[in-house]
């Protein structure tokens, strides 16, 4: 959801608007190769549940970059017909990356830096306070590898963002 993170991966990315995945919950159950949990959407029996998100437009030529960044074929599948609801109640077909159930574990938890990337993205888009509090309350762990490139990159991005030096500073 953090525009500067997506724009670094897909140079053509442009924010299109806020959208909701109705009837879903966000969970950090996708087992990552680094031992942590990554975000995915889980279908809910409660149609009142929703996951807030952001619609981005990207050039079709950037789709392979997005696939690589999101782990398409490595536990995530690109759903190219995922319907979301916009703030004006339009139903829009979009792309979402959903974790294979075989790659999910309810005991998985995200590293703090990963959860913070999600939280900062939600703050950037001014999601409601209760939604932000729920994200903040997600149990997370400390990454045991201080030299992990993804950790280092995330912390640098979060630091630049906090200092107002990121392209999408709050």
Image (spheres, rainbow, N blue to C red):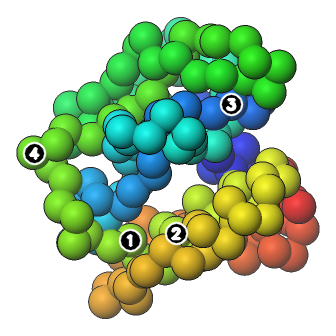
Q: Earlier in the sequence, mark 2 or mark 3?
A: 3
Q: Nearer the viewer, residue 74 or 152?
A: 74
Q: Earlier in the sequence, mark 1 or mark 2?
A: 1
Q: Nearer the viewer, residue 91 or 141?
A: 91
164 relative to 64, above or below: below
109 relative to 118, above or below: below
Q: Quick one: SS at disc 4?
A: helix
Q: Are marks 1 and 2 in contact (CB under 8 Å)?
A: yes
User: Seen in the image, is 163 located left or right of residue 98?
Assistant: right
* C-alpha gap between disc 2 and disc 3: 20 Å
Q: Are marks 3 and 4 in contact (CB under 8 Å)?
A: no
Residue drawn where x is 31% and y is 89% of the image: 144
Q: Quadrant of residue 50?
A: top right
- The answer to whether one can see residue 23 in this image is yes
| Mark number displayed over residue 19 | 3
Q: Nearer the viewer, residue 95 or 136?
A: 136
- Give the quarter of the figure containing the C terminus: bottom right
Closer mark to the observer between disc 2 and disc 3: 3
- The answer to whether one can see residue 65 in this image is no
Residue drawn where x is 46% and y is 18% of the image: 82
* C-alpha gap between disc 1 and disc 3: 23 Å
Q: Earlier in the sequence, mark 3 or mark 4?
A: 3
Q: Which residue is mark 1?
A: 110
Q: Which residue is mark 2?
A: 115
Q: Earlier in the sequence, mark 4 or mark 1?
A: 4
* C-alpha gap between disc 2 and disc 4: 22 Å
Q: Which residue is mark 4?
A: 102
Closer mark to the observer between disc 1 and disc 3: 3
* C-alpha gap between disc 1 and disc 2: 6 Å
Q: Position of residue 111 (x, y in %)?
A: 41, 76
3 relative to 35, above or below: above
The crowd level at tag 2 (other Cα within 10 Å; few <14, some 14-19, many 20+) is: many
């Amino acid at each position: 959801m953090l525009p500067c993170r997506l724009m670094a991966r897909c140079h053509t990315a442009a924010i299109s608007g806020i959208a909701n995945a109705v009837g879903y919950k966000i969970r950090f159950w996708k087992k990552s190769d680094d031992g942590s949990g990554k975000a995915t959407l889980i279908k809910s029996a409660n149609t009142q549940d929703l996951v807030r998100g952001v619609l981005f437009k990207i050039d079709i030529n950037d789709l392979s970059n997005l696939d690589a960044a999101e782990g398409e074929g490595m536990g995530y599948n690109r759903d190219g017909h995922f319907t979301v609801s916009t703030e004006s109640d339009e139903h829009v077909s979009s792309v979402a990356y959903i974790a294979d159930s075989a790659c999910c574990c309810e005991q998985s938890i995200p590293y703090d830096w990963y959860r913070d990337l999600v939280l900062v993205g939600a703050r950037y888009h001014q999601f409601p306070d209760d939604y932000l509090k729920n994200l903040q309350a997600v149990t997370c762990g400390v990454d045991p590898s201080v030299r992990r490139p993804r950790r280092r990159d995330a912390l640098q991005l979060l630091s630049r963002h906090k200092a107002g030096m990121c392209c999408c500073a709050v």
